[in-house]
Image: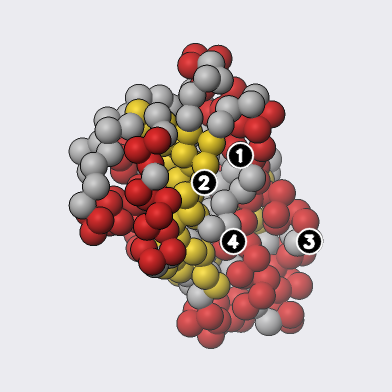
Amino acid sequence: MSHSLAEKRILITREKAQARKLIQLVRDTGAIPCVAPMIRFEPIPLTTTKKEYMELSKQQWLFFTSANTVRFFNQDIKKLGIEVPHLIASVGEKTTKALLNLGYKVDFQPSIFQGSVMVEEFVQRYGTSINVTIVSGESAREEIPSLLTKYSVPFTQLKIYRTIENKESERLLNSHLKTGIDICFFTSPSTVHACVQLAKNMYLNKLKETCLCIAIGETTATSLLECGFKKVTYPKKYTMEEMVECAKKYVEEGV
């Protein structure tokens, strides 16, 4: 066991169902996980998305942008009783694992978990004379659609779930902040924005000035900096395991 994080109080802001692995990773270091889920997810009703689902047969490729999209997509198509004969592109390892676990075949995954790399490598391999549907959440970034537009790749978007601020965690969050937090883990811009909204100013200001914030990737790190957090870093590989390693390295080396 590494002792560099021993007894450190680490705030975990990830959605409850997805936080279990990160909680265990933190415990394995000897640190204290302080869990306050900042967001929750809910499906967009099929009354809203059914038409888009029924038109999927016109598309050649499905782009999955997160494990969440896989979960909600799979629930929806089972309810609708439709099949998925499409070629499938996954944004990264976690999304690929979610697809494979549900029996889907993954035909393309980029070398790096990053939207820009996904589109660039996809176009290099398959060209632009194809039809794509991007399966995503309602608040998904516009990076992939913008790049597909840049390369003149025809696409549609199927937005199948919403990210919602978890106000039920407000009291829990502020209790953790009052006691004191050494390190914060943020796994999406949504967790950052919800934390800013739900934290009391007296605690939030201290958090911004003194707390080490580990983002899962560059986009989340940018959101933290834009919100005024001072000590922000993120790993080269965008995974929970690497977030923990990043925290260890910072504490041990100060970098």
The residue that label 2 is drawn on is 157
> Residue 121 location in percent, x, y?
54, 20
Give the mark nearer the N terminus: 1 vs 2: 1
Asked if the residue under mark 4 is in contact with the one under mark 2, i.e. CB atoms within 8 Å, the reply is: no
In the rendered image, residue 96, in percent from the top left (x then y), is placed at 35, 36
Above or below residue 88? Residue 75 is below
Q: Are marks 1 and 2 in contact (CB under 8 Å)?
A: yes
Where does the C terminus fall, quadrant-wise?
top right
- Front of the two marks 2 and 3: 2
Question: In the figure, residue 128 lies in which quadrant?
Answer: top right
**Residue to which mark 1 is pinned:** 145
- Report the residue marked by disc 3: 228
- At numbered mark 1, what does the secondary structure look like: helix, strand or loop? helix
- Label 4 sits on what residue type? Ser
Q: Which residue extends farthest bottom?
A: 171
**Could you tell me how far apart the alpha carbons at marks 3 and 1 are, in whole angstroms?**
28 Å
Circle 4 is placed at which residue position? 190
Q: State which mark lies toward you, 3 or 1.
A: 1
Which element carries disc 2, helix, strand or loop?
Answer: strand
**Which badge, 3 or 1, is on the more N-terminal residue?**
1
The number of numbered discs placed on residues in the rendered structure image is 4
- Gap in Å between the C-alphas at discs 2 and 4? 20 Å
Is 184 rendered above or below residue 244?
below
Q: CA distance from mark 2 to mark 3?
A: 32 Å
